[in-house]
Image (cartoon, rainbow, N blue to C red):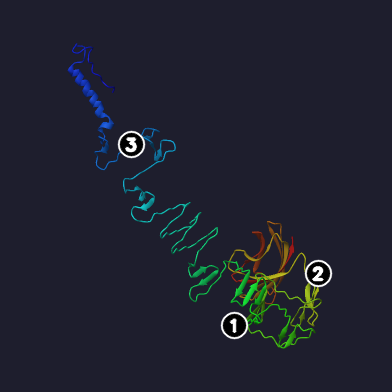
Amino acid sequence: MAQELINLGALADDGTGDTIRIAGTRINNNFTELFARPSVISDINVIQNNISTTASNADIVIKPSGTGNVVFPGITVEDNNIKASRTNDDLKIIPNGSGSVVIDGIGFAGTSIVGTDSTIVNVNENLIVDGTLNADTPTFASPVTVNSTLDVTSGTTLSTLTVSGASSFVGTTTIDNLTFNDNIISTSSNADLNLTPGGTGVVNVSNLTIDSSINLTDNVIKVMRSNDDFVLSANGTGSVQVSKIDMNEGTVDNTVIGGTTPAVGTFTTVSITDPSVTADGVTITDNTIKANRSDDDVEFTANGSGNVVIEVIRFPNADGSANQVFKTDGSGNMSYFTSPILFDVSNLTDGTATVSGGSSAAQAIDTFPVATYRSAKYTIQISDATADRYALIEANVTHNGSQAFISVFSGVDNGSSDGSSVYDTLDLSADVDSGNVRLLGTVNNTNNQVVKFVRRPIKV
């Protein structure tokens, strides 16, 4: 409703204005509209410079319309963002006196950040400190990157420390049980100093001196003190093993080494008492020789025209022709020869199967792959031990890739014990199943039939 104005007339008391009743009505209508507004009937009180709500525990909500924002001098509240309105202005939140700015349990007071409930303050994302970091007793649960100087002045425990640049430790530095001072690394009392690489790594030292007496440089091991002996000593019943040795002087079992006139050396018998001896890729244990690298061959190679001899068997020192086999001359000499029974497009295979009686189902006796063989000839022996009946028959099988065909030839059987009648117990058939030709048998009585066969297949 629009505002209602009281007609005051042209001049005072000229009788042209509204009557007192009409003026009162207009005043009432205006106040009715004013008190009907949400801003008046709400629970908001504005007293002097205080804005409060009269409803118990109620919020005060300042809500602009549409895309509008709540704007204060220098500050704009846009949705859930508070930002400075003036260009390049700081956004300052300043507490009073010794108070702090508290945001969800985190208190900010001057240059300090504290947990208001005295618990741990967690920084869950990457933290970059460009200046000096002073920490009393910090605990870091994940990797920490320090791009400037890390000054450790008191006892500090580090689970993992990765240093990309140079590190300087002044004076004596202790890490776990190790002490570092100048160029000296030492351990705690009576503790060993272990250098252990990871995985397939090695401890690589270019020049190493042990106890001021032994030096290792490149591939040379030498004593340091003048006129000292070089002693290699095994422990207990162990022995010193050297794979290859070149001696320039001295003696072995009183045989002079390195003399001006070469002489034949006579040595005592060498006895190896260890359970096993390893020489490069071969291990000898008791009476067993085996390769110790995965998938390695064990090779016996004679010298020149010599032969490898095992027991009294002498093997040839050169390979034969393709498809040849070994033969012996009866005196231990092996040689290659071509066998007249080796086949090219066929072979001989035998097998056995038991076909159960009392079943009308055809049961598999033998199979061969369709892709490899076209046909097969079977010689089949059938034994019915329960009825004391036996037969020998032949069968030819071929296929066209999807169907199999069979022809059975009558053979011989013991019939009525005297051979006067035929005893036919097994019906043979053939089919193709899952890429294989199957020879099938169906028993026509209740007795199990033991089938033994010889198969000669012919390739496709």
Answer with left or right where residue 278 lies relative to residue 55: right
Q: For numbered disc 1, what is the local secondary structure?
A: loop
Q: Circles 2 and 1: CB distance less than 8 Å?
A: no
Q: For numbered disc 2, what is the local secondary structure?
A: loop
**Amino acid on which disc 1 is placed:** Asn
Residue 28 percent location from the top left of the image:
21, 24
Residue 27 percent location from the top left of the image:
22, 22
**Amino acid on which disc 2 is placed:** Ser
Mark 2 or mark 1: which comes first in sequence?
A: 1
Q: Is residue 384 visible?
A: no
Q: Which residue is mark 2?
A: 321
Q: Give the Cα separation between the discs numbered 1 and 3.
A: 90 Å
Q: Nearer the viewer, mark 3 or mark 2?
A: 3
Answer with left or right where residue 78 lies relative to residue 25: right
Q: Which residue is mark 3?
A: 62
Question: If the image is split into quadrants, where does the C terminus sit?
Answer: bottom right
